[in-house]
Amino acid sequence: MPIIALYPGTFDPITNGHTDLITRASRIFDEVIVAIAARPDKRPLFSLMQRVQMAKRVTQNLPSARVVGFEGLLINCVRDHSASVVVRGLRAVSDFEYEFQLASANRRLAPDIETVFLTPSEAHTFTSATLVKEISMYQGDVSSFVDPEVHSALKTKFS
């Protein structure tokens, strides 16, 4: 039976750090679903549809990766896609407490679903979508943090 993992996030925008984790998760699991949360409460820079399209383009060379958008409770999305694992990224120790709380809550809601933490490669340890947006807003060069298509979308957004 194939093991399907779901990697959730807002991906606003998708960064090379995200792509690194998707690539590495694709080596571990039979299928990796990149689940992009609508999260209007976070006031994303890009619409859900734009974020989904960017992620699809960035992951198009990963045959075991699939991109979907979702609203609502993560556990419902996991079940809707028949996944059994949630993949979460840990960039720094400061991420651990929050991620541990989420994993614990998800375990209470769905004891049959496991959470797996992956750390990005050293080159992407401090890359975050928030940092990328802030640098872009001030016309800084984020080409080393994101795919060229995402870089272009950011330049258009902040021009």
Image (cartoon, rainbow, N blue to C red):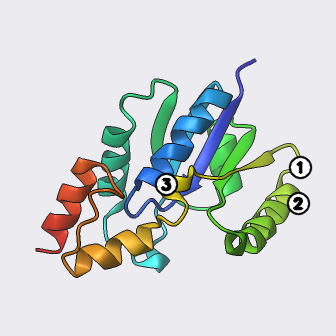
Report whether 96 appears left or right of 30.
Answer: right
In whole angstroms, how far apart are the C-alphas of marks 1 and 3? 34 Å
- Image height of 59 relative to 91, above or below: above
* Residue extending furthest toward the bottom: 138
Callout 1 touching callout 3 (CB < 8 Å): no
- Going 67% across and 45% down the picture, which residue do you hit? 78
Q: Check disc 2 and report its element: helix, strand or loop.
A: helix
Quadrant of the image occupied by residue 21? top right
Is mark 2 in CB contact (under 8 Å) with mark 1? yes
Neighbor class of circle 1 (other Cα within 10 Å; few <14, some 14-19, many 20+) is few
Of pointers 3 and 2, the one earlier in the residue sequence: 2
Q: Distance between the residues labelled 2 and 1?
A: 6 Å
Q: Quadrant of the N terminus?
A: top right
Point 83% across, 51% down: residue: 110
- Location of the C terminus by quadrant is bottom left
* 56, 159: nearer the viewer: 159
Q: Name the residue under label 1.
A: 111
Q: In this view, does 49 lie to the left or right of 86?
A: left
Q: Residue 108 carries which label?
A: 2
Q: Nearer the viewer, residue 50 or 77?
A: 50
Q: Is residue 134 above or below residue 34?
A: below
Residue ID for mark 3? 123
Task: Kindly tell me whether residue 91 is visible in this rendering.
Answer: yes
| Residue 34 in sight | no
| Kind of residue at badge 2 | Arg
Q: Position of residue 150 (x, y in %)?
A: 27, 54
